[in-house]
Amino acid sequence: MAGPMVFEEKEKFLERLRGLVREGVPGERIRVITPFGVPEVEEILPRGRSKVRFFALVGAASGTVTGFAFTILTSLSWPLIVGGKPIVSLPPFLIIAFALTILFGALSTFAGFLLLSRLPSLRGIRSGEEFGNAFVILVEDGERQ
Amino acid sequence: MGIADRYAKVDRDVLAAMKRPGRVYLAGLAFTATLVVIGGALWAYQVRSGLGVAGYTHPVNWAIYITNFVFWVGIAHSGTLISAVLYLFRARYRTSFNRAAEAMTVFALMVAGLFPLIHLGRSWVFYYLIPYPTQRQLWVNFRSPLIWDVFAVGTYFTVSLVFFYVGMIPDFAAAKQHVAGIRKKIFSVLSLGWKGTEKEWRHYGMLYLFLAAFATPLVASVHSVVSWDFAMSIVPGWHTTIFAPYFVAGAIFSGTAMVITLVVPLRKAMNLHEYITDDHFESIAKILLFTSLIVSYAYIVEFGLASYGENAFEKEAFRYRALGEFRYLTWAMIFCNSLVPLTLFARRLRRNITFLLVVSLLVNVGMWLERFVIIVTSLAHDFDPYVWGTYRPTYVEVGISLGSFGLFFMLYLLFVKNLPVLSISEIKEHL
């Protein structure tokens, strides 16, 4: 890998990044490190939308199903009428299903983020390599096209 | 000053809080810790002696502990409003408050969660509330609002904690470069090895957006569920359909006041005037004023519903609330929640930070009184005059309540010295 290109200013960093792409360096070989999220990077190096959203969908849907299944099945397993309400009382069960939708959705999204970003990373935790507030471009070795 | 210097200044300013604490800070910590010890000792005394040491009498069997529960859950709400809802609306001034507000949410929920246990009397059997398979094959009653509470508040706490932590991951990575020793190790582990690559930021952006989206409905749902603890019963003064929106507005109102109460001294003590400006406070003051108007409207509707209806019990409940033995508390509540915030229509007063702090303190008092008045007057004076009663708190209840304030502020003081109090990466993004 070539040495890192370090920039103090976002604009100069973006300019160089655009330059690299114009020069024909394939996007897969470029890695950037920034002190905060820079939306322009996504425009210059399009990687597609994050798949974290699928984790959100699957988590939330499984929460809804779990909420209804859990309340209905446990109520049916000992059918005890309380307060004259039906054994399967959907309106109150909806509240449980709603809460579990949010809970499972949020936790699964977080898990998806960790998985896709490969965090926690032991190497990252131990590594002393810090760029502070700099914007960094790393180009992995390979034939220039 | 070049941009690199400005970034470095943000790091320095935000992390300056973590330096050796001063005398005032230590005195504050000692004071709040003392309150916690007193509260804890009184709770131990109550566990040993039984609930008889609390002021519960027939018919008032819900009182200060439940007031505190509702109060603290309410406080939590504005944290989520500021961090999640304002994020979705792209309100920039959120950056100044979001970390402080998220921390407030987590701590308020920790304190709130204690009160159902304290109120149980036999606190050690709290796990009966949790649905788990037992040899008796008997499950909890999912039709009970108290079980909805367990799910609503449990979910709220978990999601708020994840949101709070996720927001800090890039900041831990930034902060670890400026600290040494054990702190560096802890921050390194908490940063999960975050480097700030484009892949991490891309997934992080999506995660944050979804967490905000998941947390947003909680702002409305959790306090609605809390309000149903009351509204699902038939007690006059509780059994009304406006309770959910009324409680949600009240929650955001009280929470916003608490954010102001916490951030005004924080800004002064840590010299963060550059990041938390008077404009930001003015924006928050507008939320306070707006929610105050909704709450006042709910008060009017509540009294209106009772007086226009033909339900004698409901009429009597509200007559008693306004003119009965707790009338001073009701009037104080109206003064603090409906009248005082009207002053914020004046721009000059909205921008007067000392005045804003005073208003926020009064609102905190008023909102605590609101819950007390709703809970106690309704129970003390329900259907049958033969069972009417009254309520006076004992020193045990007062001590435990003060202990809860001590716990909240102690956790907050520990937070400001140990974690980044502003979102470093977001501030840099907006420079």
Image (spheres, grey):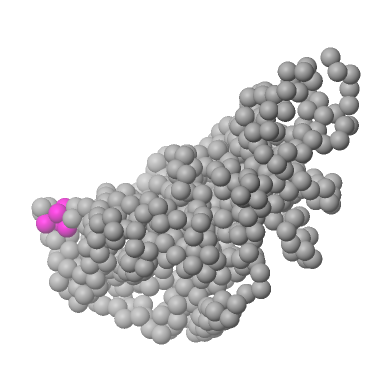
Residue B95: image location, x then y, percent? 51, 49
**Image quadrant containing the C terminus of chain A:** top right
From where the camera sits, is residue B355 visible? yes
- The number of numbered discs placed on residues in the rendered structure image is 0
Residue B275: image location, x then y, percent? 51, 55
**Location of residue B350 (image quadrant):** bottom left
Question: In the figure, is residue B193 to the left or right of B136?
Answer: right
- Residue closest to the eye, A21 or B90: A21
- Residue closest to the eye, B121 or A117: A117
Question: In the figure, is residue B333 to the left or right of A17?
Answer: left
Residue B345: image location, x then y, percent? 25, 55
**Image quadrant containing the N terminus of chain A:** top right
Question: In the figure, is residue B326 to the left or right of B198?
Answer: left
Name the residue located 87 percent from the left edge and 32 percent from the top edge: A2
Name the residue located 63 percent from the left edge and 24 percent from the top edge: A43
Residue B258: image location, x then y, percent? 42, 63
User: Farthest residue in the top direction?
Assistant: A145
From where the camera sits, is residue B295 visible? no
* Prevailing SS of the magenta stretch: helix
Q: Is residue A136 above or below residue B55?
A: above
**Highlighted magenta segment, given as a residue range:** B303-307
Question: In the figure, is residue B166 to the left or right of A120?
Answer: left
Name the residue located 68 percent from the left edge and 28 percent from the top edge: A15
- Residue closest to the eye, B331 or B266: B266
Specify whether residue B253 is painted magenta: no
- Residue closest to the eye, B85 or B388: B85
